[in-house]
Amino acid sequence: MHIPENYLSPSTCAVLGAAMVPVWKRASANVKREFSKKKMPLLGVGAAFSFLIMMFNLPLPGGTTGHAVGAALISILLGPYAASISVTIALAVQALFFGDGGILALGANAFNLAFIMPFTAHYIYKIMMGRGGNRRNYIAAFLAGYVSLNAAALFTAVELGIQPVLFKDASGMPLYNPYGLSISVPAMMIPHLLVAGVVEGIVTAGVYGYIRKVSGEGLNEGRGLKIRPLYVALIVMIILSPLGLLASGTAWGEWGADEIKSIVGFVPQGMEKGFNFKSSLPDYTVPGFSEHMGYILSGIIGVLIIVFLFMAISAALFIKREVKITDK
Amino acid sequence: MIEIRNISFSYKDAPALKDINLYIAKGESIALIGPNGSGKSTLLKIINGILFPQRGEYFFDGTSITAKRLEDNAFSKKFHKRIGFVFQSSDSQLFNPTVYDEIAFAPRQMGLSEGEIERRVSDLLKLLQIEELRCRVPYHLSGGEKRKVAVASVLAHNPDVLVLDEPMNGLDPKTKRFLRDLLIKLNSHGKTIICSTHDFEYVDGVFKRAVVFSKEHTIIRDDEYGRIISDDEFLYENNIK
Amino acid sequence: MDWLFREDRYEPGSDSLKFIDKSLMSILKILSKIDRLGGQRRGILYGVTPPLKLISTILTVVCVSTSRDATFLLSAGLFVLINLIMLEKSDRKRVLALGITASSFSAVMLIPSMATGNIINSLIIVYKVLLTVSMANILSVSTGWFDVSASLKLLLIPDIFILVLEITLKYIYLLGEISLNMLTALKIRSIGKNNNKYSSISALMGNLFLKSKEMGEELYSAMECRGFTGEYKRVLAFNISRIDAVYAIIVLALTAAYF
Ligand SMILES: Nc1ncnc2c1ncn2[C@@H]1O[C@H](COP(=O)(O)OP(=O)(O)O)[C@@H](O)[C@H]1O
Ligand SMILES: [Mg+2]
């Protein structure tokens, strides 16, 4: 999820960093207002918390382990603005002091993890949350984690995937990340949709549930944000940011029809090159449709099935736990 | 049961234990005494297989306890089952949503039936006189209540050896007396008790033996508890009293 | 009560505790890196004034990332090499280990691309990853962290953010130690089969959050008691020595090679 240094062109980093400036400005103004200036130090503790969350490993099927990113959780706990700042600081600490590299890529990583992820999580949670109904809130928290991580992953994949289209050397070889959208999107999205998102969702809902149980306070619940303007801003950002990237790229002209098709339609050509993940997926076409439409459609259906499946599983898990606890 | 041979331990550059030798037999009840920073907590962590000495060896029931040995999952679990540790700070030890779940954590892992678990938890709640805390959240309990829950949660897996790190710290006199009586009772039923302390007022009758650490991280005396505790000059000299 | 006074025979079932061990390892790694905050070390590079080192590091990272010029990239490599030689042995090992890990990871990621003919550009990425990760780590091991954060003033970062950043560093250590204790407690009580590992870890994280909140509020009250009103002035004091001049000249020469 964390984009390492040198995988994005410096201009992409600059554009994403520039896009973060208004976000940071707004976030700090907002935090100052809501937290009061005097309480700003609390954010440091929040940032330390978001840094440490990533150190907790969870078992995954197949005997391996993985960890959550935590931005959705912090967004629910502290509000999206405080989360945005906390996660940014955690990323800066990682780049500057823990030497993960990523000094130049900080803007891009912040864009995905300190903007897209906490705000997506916030809106999903707000929209899904019911009044007081516990189970619905767990599901809201689960979905906030699941969807926001996948949104961040999708942005990451797109940022990586447009690199070979935009930045080539004289002989046409890619300068930065060499894998186009047809590879980067599935390579990022398949594991995130199937595994990492679920982990994020369960952790978000689990910690949320624990904290709710232990103390009703500590949750940034009542503090509603006006959804509309930010909603619009978010959508505009989503549309504009790839365009901004294109504009900043060296060559509009090199942006051939094929590439556009591959961005818009996720054309599965070139898949046989690079990773051969096609083999791991059974027949992808729904009869009666053109190949592309079928691909998109089966993708959407797949995602929906997965979402509902995990909603059901998470609901079942939490009901079980609740019974265990309350009937003592 | 516990045998420590020439153990030395340092954190980075700071030495914490130097050349420690100690043998503790089954059923003993022993106090580790010494000024702050003399290495008591470090030794207790080594005994619990949390830290491993850079030099020397530690045997538990004849088996050498090393990082490598504890990588063996089954062995590690059996070892931790037999020795229970009450941390200096109960905060870090309690992580379940209710006191009931906290105490039931280990028995559930052992695969006991829900009936058996219920029995164990109820017994322990009664033993520690915290029945009214059953459904409370550990996070919000007072210091003394937390300590009692921590002790109960460790006793729940019925360890043979009970290790406590300054258990009397921060407790009120009544709770201290209660804990003292509990330790005496557990010891009289055959549990081995190892306990670090620098509080002598409320522990009379608990320990038969004491080991004294110096601020240079060595053992300077290993004697009958009563004899050490009445040697005022010695205690004063070594910053214990 | 009889069960408590009887020794029981117990054979644990099999159940992996890898997630606890892995978590313990990652937190230990973090803590071991932070421990440097205290110790002062000897060596020329350690004496270079922090603001200069910070600016130089950022400058060279940007140059390396944007350059395609073989001469410059090789000079930058030489620069990193010289820096490495100036480090103490244990620091050097650490920086090298991190750089090599990151670049090997890159190399593996790029194998499919190299197989389709994109060899030179892939190797350049691997090389640049090695350089940039090494430079960031050289800065981190050779400079007091609070000196680095104070130097951020020069990048027009507001003082209040520097304060927040410094609190973050301190609390990563404090909360890290708490996490370590909690995970250890979980580990030594994990004596059988844990059927709900996710809820155990979630509870640890939840406790960590509550603890953070409590500590943060305490910190805030303590600061308020000592007169904190939301204004903060981070003082950046440094003096320039001959070593700094030499270091600056080298960095300038390197930047000149870029153009
Ligand atoms: N995590 C740690 N890192 C570095 N030094 C430590 C750590 N824990 C303890 N020490 C040091 O080791 C020595 C022994 O500490 P400890 O075993 O806690 O003593 P006691 O429990 O007798 O007070 C002290 O000098 C202490 O500063
Ligand atoms: Mg101690």
Image (cartoon, coloured by chain):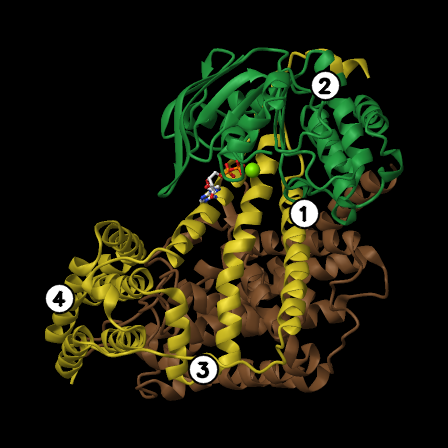
Chain colours: A brown, B green, C yellow
Q: Which residue is mark 1?
A: C203
Q: Which residue is mark 2?
A: B205
> Are there few (<14), some (14-19), or many (20+) residues within 10 Å of tag 1?
many
Q: Is residue A262 visible?
A: no
The image quadrant of residue A148 is: bottom right
- Determine the CA span between mark 2 and mark 4: 70 Å
* Residue type indicated by callout 4: Leu
The one of C5 and A284 positioned closer to us in this rendering: C5
Report the quarter where the C terminus of chain A lies.
top right
- Determine the CA span between mark 2 and mark 3: 62 Å
Q: Which residue is mark 4?
A: C78
The one of A325 and B42 positioned closer to us in this rendering: B42
* Residue type indicated by callout 1: Ala
Measuring from the top left, give residue B218's x and y in whole percent.
Answer: 43, 28
Q: Are marks 1 and 4 in contact (CB under 8 Å)?
A: no
Classify mark 2: helix, strand or loop.
Answer: loop
* Residue type indicated by callout 3: Ile
- Determine the CA span between mark 3 and mark 4: 31 Å
> Are there few (<14), some (14-19), or many (20+) residues within 10 Å of tag 3?
few
Q: Which residue is mark 3?
A: C157
Classify mark 3: helix, strand or loop.
Answer: loop
The disc numbered 1 marks a residue on which chain?
Answer: C
* Residue type indicated by callout 2: Gly
> Where is B113 relative to A188, above or below?
above
Q: Are marks 2 and 3 in contact (CB under 8 Å)?
A: no
- Determine the CA span between mark 2 and mark 1: 39 Å
In the image, the residue with mark 1 has its CB under 8 Å from the nearest atom of ligand 1: no
Measuring from the top left, give residue A308's x and y in whole percent.
Answer: 70, 56
